[in-house]
Amino acid sequence: MSEAVRSVERQSAEQGHPLDSFFAPSSIAIIGASPDLTKIRGILLSFLRKNDYPGRIYPVNPSYPEIDGLRCYPTVAAIGEQVDLALVTIPANVVLPALEECAAAGVRHSVIISSGFAEEGGESAGLQQQIAELAKRTGMRVSGPNAEGFYNEPGRVSATFSPTVDIKPGESRLIASERRIGIVAQSGGIGFSLFNRGKAIGLSFSTIVSTGNEADLAAGEFLQYMVQDKSTDVVMLFIEGVRDPENFVRAAAQAAAIGKPVIVCKIGRSEAGARASASHTASMTGWNAGYQAIFVKYGFLQADDPDEAVAIAAVLTTAPLPKGNRVGVITVSGGAGAWAADTVAMNGLDVPVLSETLQSEIRALIPSYGSARNPVDITAQAVHTGGLQRTIELLNESDEVDLVLVVTSMASDRRVALNPQALKPVIDSGKKPVLFYTYTLPSQLGRSTLAAAGVVVHAGLAPLGKALGEVVRRGAFQAPEGRAAVAQADARLVMRLQAAGGALSEHDTKILLRDAGVSLPNERLVADAAELEAAMQAVGFPLAMKIQSPDITHKTEAGGVRLGIAGVEDGRDAYEKLLAGVRSDKPDARIQGVLLQPMARKGVEFIIGAIRDPVFGLMVMVGFGGVMTELFKDVAYRPAPVSAAEARAMLDRLRASPLLRGFRGAPPADVTALASLAAQVSRFAAGLGEHMAELELNPVIVHPDGQGVTIVDALLVPAGGG
Amino acid sequence: MSEAVRSVERQSAEQGHPLDSFFAPSSIAIIGASPDLTKIRGILLSFLRKNDYPGRIYPVNPSYPEIDGLRCYPTVAAIGEQVDLALVTIPANVVLPALEECAAAGVRHSVIISSGFAEEGGESAGLQQQIAELAKRTGMRVSGPNAEGFYNEPGRVSATFSPTVDIKPGESRLIASERRIGIVAQSGGIGFSLFNRGKAIGLSFSTIVSTGNEADLAAGEFLQYMVQDKSTDVVMLFIEGVRDPENFVRAAAQAAAIGKPVIVCKIGRSEAGARASASHTASMTGWNAGYQAIFVKYGFLQADDPDEAVAIAAVLTTAPLPKGNRVGVITVSGGAGAWAADTVAMNGLDVPVLSETLQSEIRALIPSYGSARNPVDITAQAVHTGGLQRTIELLNESDEVDLVLVVTSMASDRRVALNPQALKPVIDSGKKPVLFYTYTLPSQLGRSTLAAAGVVVHAGLAPLGKALGEVVRRGAFQAPEGRAAVAQADARLVMRLQAAGGALSEHDTKILLRDAGVSLPNERLVADAAELEAAMQAVGFPLAMKIQSPDITHKTEAGGVRLGIAGVEDGRDAYEKLLAGVRSDKPDARIQGVLLQPMARKGVEFIIGAIRDPVFGLMVMVGFGGVMTELFKDVAYRPAPVSAAEARAMLDRLRASPLLRGFRGAPPADVTALASLAAQVSRFAAGLGEHMAELELNPVIVHPDGQGVTIVDALLVPAGGG
């Protein structure tokens, strides 16, 4: 046994994660191994050996006595030694018996590379179900099918046929940072392309795993592995749809708690994107909100494009998190510096004018036609006189900025403007992120020179701007304190809901809310004209009348609402007309009566709601109310229940939040009451558990500070009802 | 004289543009030429020769008898032959006498590379002013100072020291398209970096010009040149601030009329970006709206990042404009295809499900575990069986999509999935854009193989998505018909404005508007309590009262507004209290009286305004009204005046435009009346010419279709007043 194998085994023993022997197996069997290097079955063996896999390799194929100098076994059983991992590359229809054989032989884990399962539908999907059951029954963990495998770089395990792990003769590896990125990808193509793009700019990686169809091992469990894995400093996720949300959320919470950053690329946000992601075709409406809620809650950094993901990873692995959003831009080209300043500003960063003291220090280093304000235009001239290096040092030491962005040209393959020996101490100081963008395409010389100082040269401005926005947000992120509040089912509430029957009216909904302690206006349901006058007097004028029927969801559209009723006569008239109108329009609707409520005092309109996300369960929602909710989609979601403090943070994320703080001379609104109501509603919804599909309080009128809120309308849709 | 020189001269004679002999000079003098290749003065000569400049070169420097085998002249006068272009690279303080000498010797044009003029301020700025005057006086056109020069690729004129035009031994040029891009850049660094980035992916270029400080020749005039230049197929602009807006707008209109696409990168959109662009420090507030208005009006394609600009150029030079927004995505990786579908959808494209007929044709070409819906996942397998090529052909022929996006991996340096001989006929068919994205980094083999078919390999997904959004918009763009409406000053209106004195009240503003034929509600100004009752009866109840004073702009904040007055008694009371309140709060305000107006009927609130843009002059604005204007910045600008049809197009661009079409069961609003009012207001504002600074009608209540609009409030701020 080689030292490397022993080291891998020792490591596994120390860490003791069940997937250690999956990602760093002491032995690998290749089921279906072949000497044919044009086939996946041949490539697997070749890549394992080219990458110097330190463990034992057992090719399995009855057709060959040996492959590439290794003894080839007719069956797994014939190996006669412990196999940690089996790579399965045989046709779909013979996979199941081979897995049974592996399990019987005591193989711990397997990766099914073969395609033709759930993605094909029909009988093949059933095959996948049998694989899942086999894993449960035998305890052998299975990754895939339809997976591209994984690559564990520090462990030198290339259990994949991805050409990105091929070793090319004479190729030298660029290393700008030793901090390693682990990738969990629901697409092998994308997972390994992120590795490919990151490697090219000098990033280091721990493990890239492609999860395939996830018959057994799924993305959430792999995320858990990466979060606890000591060789992984930053995690990157490519997600189409999470199949094991409990694992996923637990891992996300753990990552937030220990401060390990997670970068996420979530696709399927458009209808067409979702159509391509088989996992989500069933649940289209607004379903992405649940993912957003989880990502925001746990401080994930989000990327919309592969280069954004790689840029975020590059910043995270070469720099500390920024302590604020103030950036000093140093440039050798006025235009490029201004463009960079625009770009970071669009991403929420601030490019403050530097103090006169600092400016005068900088002016001593640059030509008279430069600028020291910020962007600091040192001019091309100052590159050669040492002004660039000195200006970087000044801004790194200064407390006027939280990040430094150096904009320069790295195109030359003959000389580089910066000396890595001088630069390295600045980077190593770890005071703040010091980042480099080249507006020309960087030469290999440029990249390797700066890599020696621990610097990645960024060649894309938009991705870098996005990355800085995300790391600034992450820098300000606070992990949720303690354990997440748990959704407590409330048996009494559920019983009351069930007693109300299928669909609920506003009145039914409000009875449940009031019963749960939610403050509501003084309202009366009038089911008989004889009760009308007393009810009007009890409610007071001016008042509103609204038809109540479990069969009428959109009361206004049905002509079932009268507003601003000023007196008794008005009221009688309105009551009659309202009932008559609805009865003629909707003769079949079950009418409970007419709800009388006082006209609400003025204020700003918000919405509070709760919805059951098909993946992550109950979510609470706050948003700007009225017509605007739909038009500007200015809403925020969080997993329910939330505390009042969390609800307040949600409100702060809305574009309409200035309205709560007192906009254009208006008094500040009672945001405390609104946040507290959102928290209360989230607990109420959690109490109903899976019996609730949707709850909407809209509008909730927020009065000036100290004067509370008024819930004008409310509607609860029970699961399967409404 | 070489054939090339003759050809250049012949071309000039035929086209006859005054700048032909600037960009394709028959002879060039280098003022300050040097044999020292570490200096700009030495590099200029070296680059001219390396690029095989076909004309005559005259080094000018009294210190040398010859440089690099060329005779060197002590002065320009000593040359004794016609010099078309002088490149000036001597210190700032000796530039002016050198220019005088050039002009005296009959030099036609000059480029001042030297720095240290307006960008330095003080005395040096004065020097630049003198250069501008010299150009006017002598007729010698001057580019710069502080310019990086230009590069005319077809003419082989490298009048620049930019390292991007250096010729490296053994370097082969990738050419995917012969259609050429011309660049006008207010930053040499950026201009040549766009060239550098474009060249690397196989784009071709006509001329790249860096405009420097624009003492004489400015960006607008260079844009005019590019628009008429037959060797330029697509124009790219990098703009900090336009100094010759009339030239610029004329060129923009010409480009729109002849259908030559213009890509624009406009910086200075953030405060910090603007700070870095010296030209705009004086005019910060909202000034970017004018640029936006011009860009939209003339169909410019906008880029926020260098790679976006290059991606747009790549699409425009390798593909026809799309006829619609329906894209067929063909992918070899499910995840990458879904990501691409998401990205194009975010940019406004549609990824429609293909017809069953087309799907069944595709299914015959791909494995059973692929998908033919769209994205079309042909799987990695089908690449090798010819399915990729055939699927591309099917979608190219189909009328179900307007663009084809092929998502594949081009990383291999050994083989390429596509055969250029088979692909070229598809590209050459010119039916629709067929574009290629690689999720891995492309190899040179991949790039050059596809270049042979006329294809650029896109390696950035976000920039490509942005590019597709922009070309789809450009495909739907209609050039403004005929000549742009001209702002006609209205002498009578101006006189009336001047008669009104400095600041105007709402009432003053409305008198002017009414006088210009704008319909306004039936209102009464009451200056004496004795007139109150009659005025109230004339206006009718319920009514609103508003204090009128040129000194009170924010009437509501000053307690000067009472709404919903229901009867005479109410009215008397409100009138007294309103006047008393304002008099005690603002004792110095000149009170004109109280304006009585009927309470407006219901409707949706919009805003119409006009503002004088510091660069492009009068702009008309429409937007979503009320508090929302400020909060959601949902507004659109166009150069004034506009026609009702243009105003309608502006309204259609608003995010709030669904409100006009009848949102959530509401009746459609009278958008015809609103558009017609916007056009009328734009003519009114144009009539006031430079005497108006700002005009705002807010809110304008838009009633249901056929019921018109109500202007509730209006305020005109005269230039220098308000």
Image: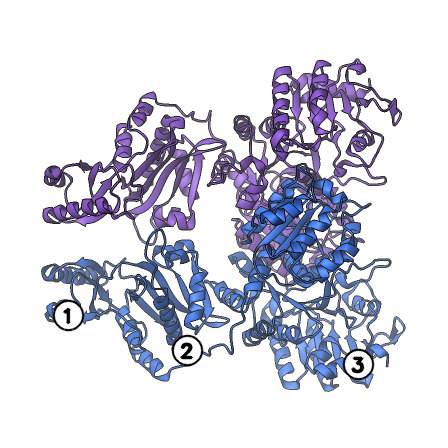
Chain colours: A blue, B purple
Question: Picture quarter containing residue B692?
Answer: top left
Q: Secondary structure at mark 2?
A: helix
Q: Amino acid at mark 1?
A: Ala
How would you rate the neighbour count of disc 3 (Cα within 10 Å): few for under 14, some for 14-19, many for 20 or more?
some
Question: Picture quarter containing residue B258?
Answer: top right
Q: Nearer the viewer, residue B339 or B288?
A: B288
How would you rate the neighbour count of disc 2 (Cα within 10 Å): few for under 14, some for 14-19, many for 20 or more?
many
Which disc, if any, is residue A538? 1
Q: Are marks 3 and 1 in contact (CB under 8 Å)?
A: no
- The residue that appears at 84% across and 33% down in the rendered structure is B36
Identify the subunit bearing mark 3: A
Quadrant placement of the N terminus of chain A: bottom right
Residue A599, image x, y percentages: 22, 61
Residue A408, image x, y percentages: 70, 46
Q: What separation in Å lies between label 2 and label 1 (alpha carbons)?
A: 35 Å
Count of marks, rendered view: 3
Question: Looking at the image, is mark 3 or mark 2 earlier in the sequence?
Answer: 3
Identify the subunit bearing mark 1: A
Residue B628, image x, y percentages: 37, 50
Task: State which mark lies toward you, 3 or 2.
Answer: 2
Which residue does the numbered mark 2 point to in the structure image? A689
Q: Nearer the viewer, residue A74 or B123?
A: B123
Which residue does the numbered mark 3 point to in the structure image? A75
Q: Amino acid at mark 3?
A: Thr
Horizontal arrangement in the rendering, residue B265 relative to residue B548 (left or right)? right
Q: Nearer the viewer, residue B259 or B585?
A: B585
Q: What separation in Å lies between label 3 and label 2 (alpha carbons)?
A: 50 Å
Question: Picture quarter containing residue B523?
Answer: top left
